[in-house]
């Protein structure tokens, strides 16, 4: 796969600010992958594709999402979540990405899920903490997870996301609950 071609495509598809976010997520994911022993090559590909469908027209996203096995579930939730499964679908169809782990990392980078692979966690975390993110508590989160084992980083990140969503009285996607519950149970068992 020609990653420069993917970058050129992304630069054309996405607003400049989002394209720069994608590049920062990719670099953050590569660094974290190297630290925790995950394939840097896979992290780079998943990082580049994670927001591939982010700025597609809502109707076009919905049309593509209808081909997804979890269409009925996703359609019940905010359209903001739809770009993740559609992005995985397009990475496979347009660029021939066949690696299941990469596709899952793209698919679940927004919601998380139970039993995430290490690559999935790397992309989820990188998307949340990349250096351009500016939201309340991000600096404290970055400091808390720096140098910690990947599993502990994921626990902190999913907890942070849950607090954020609950404070905004937001509807929470079921896979995110599964992810949160898995990490809370794991921490209580330690």
Image (cartoon, rainbow, N blue to C red):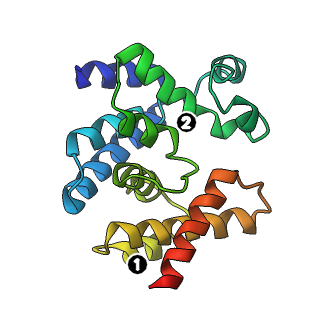
Q: Is residue 31 above or below residue 86?
A: below
Q: Using a 10 Å C-alpha cutoff, classify the residue at mark 1 as few (fewer than 14 neighbours), some (14 to 19) or many (20 or more).
A: some
Q: Using a 10 Å C-alpha cutoff, classify the residue at mark 2 as few (fewer than 14 neighbours), some (14 to 19) or many (20 or more).
A: many
Screen quadrant of the N terminus: top left
Q: Is residue 34 above or below residue 50?
A: below
Q: CA distance from mark 1 to mark 2?
A: 27 Å
* Image quadrant where residue 65 sits: top right
User: Which residue occupies 62% across, 59% down?
Assistant: 178
Depth check: give the residue in front, 149 or 53.
149
Q: Which mark is first along the chain, 2 or 1?
A: 2
- Secondary structure category for the residue under label 1: helix
User: Which residue occupies 44% across, 65% down?
Assistant: 154
Task: Give the tally of numbered discs.
Answer: 2
Depth check: give the residue in front, 153 or 11.
153
Q: Which residue is mark 1?
A: 144
- Secondary structure category for the residue under label 2: helix
Q: Is residue 17 visible?
A: no
* Image quadrant where residue 68 sits: top right
Q: Position of residue 146 (x, y in %)?
A: 32, 73
Depth check: give the residue in front, 77 or 69.
69
Screen quadrant of the C terminus: bottom left
Observer-side mark, 1 or 2, equals 2
Depth check: give the residue in front, 4 or 66.
66
Q: Which residue is mark 2?
A: 84
Q: Is residue 154 above or below residue 26?
A: below
User: Which residue occupies 48% across, 29% down?
Assistant: 88
Q: Position of residue 7 (x, y in %)?
A: 32, 25
Q: Position of residue 144 (x, y in %)?
A: 40, 78
């Amino acid at each position: 796969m020609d990653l420069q071609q993917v970058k050129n495509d992304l630069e054309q598809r996405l607003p400049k600010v989002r394209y720069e976010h994608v590049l920062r997520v990719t670099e953050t994911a590569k660094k974290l992958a190297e630290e925790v022993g995950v394939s840097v090559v896979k992290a780079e590909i998943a990082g580049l594709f994670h927001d591939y469908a982010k700025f597609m027209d809502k109707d076009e996203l919905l049309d593509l999402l209808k081909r997804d096995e979890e269409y009925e579930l996703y359609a019940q939730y905010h359209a903001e979540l739809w770009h993740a499964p559609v992005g995985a679908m397009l990475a496979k169809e347009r660029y021939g990405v066949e690696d299941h782990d990469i596709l899952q990392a793209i698919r679940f980078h927004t919601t998380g899920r139970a039993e995430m692979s290490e690559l999935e966690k790397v992309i989820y975390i990188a998307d949340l903490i990349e250096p351009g993110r500016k939201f309340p508590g991000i600096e404290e989160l970055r400091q808390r997870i720096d140098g910690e084992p990947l599993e502990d980083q994921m626990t902190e990140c999913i907890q942070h996301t849950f607090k954020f969503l609950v404070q905004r009285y937001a509807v929470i996607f079921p896979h995110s609950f599964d992810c949160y519950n898995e990490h809370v149970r794991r921490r209580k068992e330690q």
